[in-house]
Image (cartoon, rainbow, N blue to C red):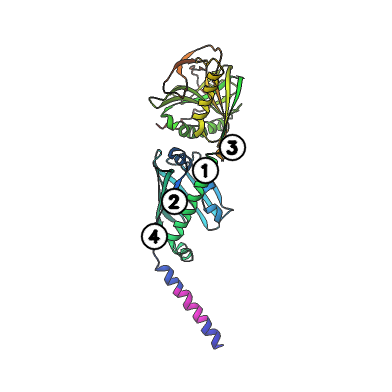
Amino acid sequence: MKILKYILLLILLAVIGLTVYIATQPGEYESEQSRIIKAQKSVVFSYVNDYKNWEDFGSWKDDDPNMQFTYSDTTIGKGAFYTWKGSSGEGKTETVFEKENDSIAQKTTFSGNEGKAYLTFKDTVGGTKVTWHSQGKLSFMDKAYAIFKGGAKKMVGDMQERTLAKLDKVISYEINTYSIQVDGVVQKSGGYYFQQKVTCKISEVQKNVGIILPSMLRFFKDNNIALTGSPFILYNTYDVPNNKASFSVCLPMREEIFTAEGSDYTSGKLEPFQALKTTLKGDYSHGKEAWDKALAHIKKNNLTENKSGSYIEVYVTSAAQVKNPSKWITEIYVPVGQSAPTEAVTTPAVSGTSVKTTTSATNTTKTVTPAKPVVKENQVIE
């Protein structure tokens, strides 16, 4: 009986000692890891800046395969966030600052504690150097767990290192796996479309599309408007020397919709036209190569580029349906033949000059009182 009491006393002392030891461990952590990602800086930044991709390269998913994620409506840029729930608890990470192709600042809450992270992107030999700096506080249970992982700094550092390694692997495959196919001359169908016009730097086209398109799709859903095809981009200007693009983010619809004066949204009608169709399967970063190949095909085969026509990109399969960039499908339509011009625009040529043209896309300007409230959507980022 005495032996049992001694054993219980030893266990109690061990528990007390361990508790004291854990309690006296540092309650804060700070760690920094870097890795060279084999891709250009704009591609790496765009991929990391979209929280829909974090589930694919975060090492925490490997440690907890059943972890569940939820995302904000807009997953790109300042204010975007994602939450997770797993075997070790639940938390939230939010972007509080971003500088295009340069840096991202985040705030993370987990187990009642708050942490901060700062990611920077720098051009270097062989690709892009990504540096991930993290710091924050630890709860008692976090400190206990960290002890068995060699300390908080090592625990966080290992997580960062594995995540950056996986990011390199994912980007090397997902971004660099693509194909471009010139399909030939086709008759592109027309119809009514809903649009929001955008003017921004050429380098920010996809970012703005990523912000605006989810809002437009949500507007369609909230107002029970039927989508009759895939979203598309209608280019008005693509001015390479001045790094400026003007375009419309469009959703095809069955009937014309009238919006109140001052609304970000307007309606338009695209007339059918003859075009050279080119299909890009893969990430949007290869879009310039696809446009170059289409225009080169026109020149090589003595086709007549119709500079009074409509230049369009159709997102047949996008991030909204499939997260893997290697599986995205974008159709490019370059007008050839004849078309009735209605307004002056600039073709989205990828050469060093801009060419003034006209387009057959007719925008509606008539205003009536809408049957449903008009929603003021996100402002365009320039």
The image shows residue 129 at horizontal and vertical percentages of 41, 46
Neighbor class of circle 3 (other Cα within 10 Å; few <14, some 14-19, many 20+) is some
Could you tell me if residue 103 is visible in this image? no
The image shows residue 136 at horizontal and vertical percentages of 40, 56
User: The N terminus lies in which quarter of the figure?
Assistant: bottom right
**Nearest to N terminus: mark 2 or mark 4:** 4
Magenta extent: 8-17
Q: Nearer the viewer, mark 1 or mark 3?
A: 1
Check disc 2 and give the amino acid type.
Thr
The image shows residue 363 at horizontal and vertical percentages of 50, 18
**Nearest to N terminus: mark 1 or mark 3:** 1
Check disc 3 and give the amino acid type.
Lys
Neighbor class of circle 4 (other Cα within 10 Å; few <14, some 14-19, many 20+) is some
Q: Nearer the viewer, mark 3 or mark 2?
A: 3
321 or 80, which is in the foreground?
321
**Nearest to N terminus: mark 4 or mark 1:** 4
132 or 200, which is in the foreground?
132
Instruction: Classify residue 99 by image quadrant.
Output: top left
State the residue position of label 2. 108
Residue depicted at 46% across the width and 45% down the height: 37
The numbered mark at residue 172 is: 1
State the residue position of label 4. 28
For the residue labelled by badge 4, is the local secondary structure a helix, a strand or a loop? Answer: strand
Per the model, the C-alpha gap separating discs 2 and 4 is 14 Å
Per the model, the C-alpha gap separating discs 4 and 1 is 34 Å
Neighbor class of circle 2 (other Cα within 10 Å; few <14, some 14-19, many 20+) is many
Per the model, the C-alpha gap separating discs 3 and 4 is 42 Å
The answer to whether 219 is drawn above or below residue 360 in the figure is below
User: The C terminus lies in which quarter of the figure?
Assistant: top left
Marks 1 & 2, CB-CB < 8 Å contact: no
Per the model, the C-alpha gap separating discs 1 and 3 is 14 Å
Per the model, the C-alpha gap separating discs 3 and 2 is 31 Å
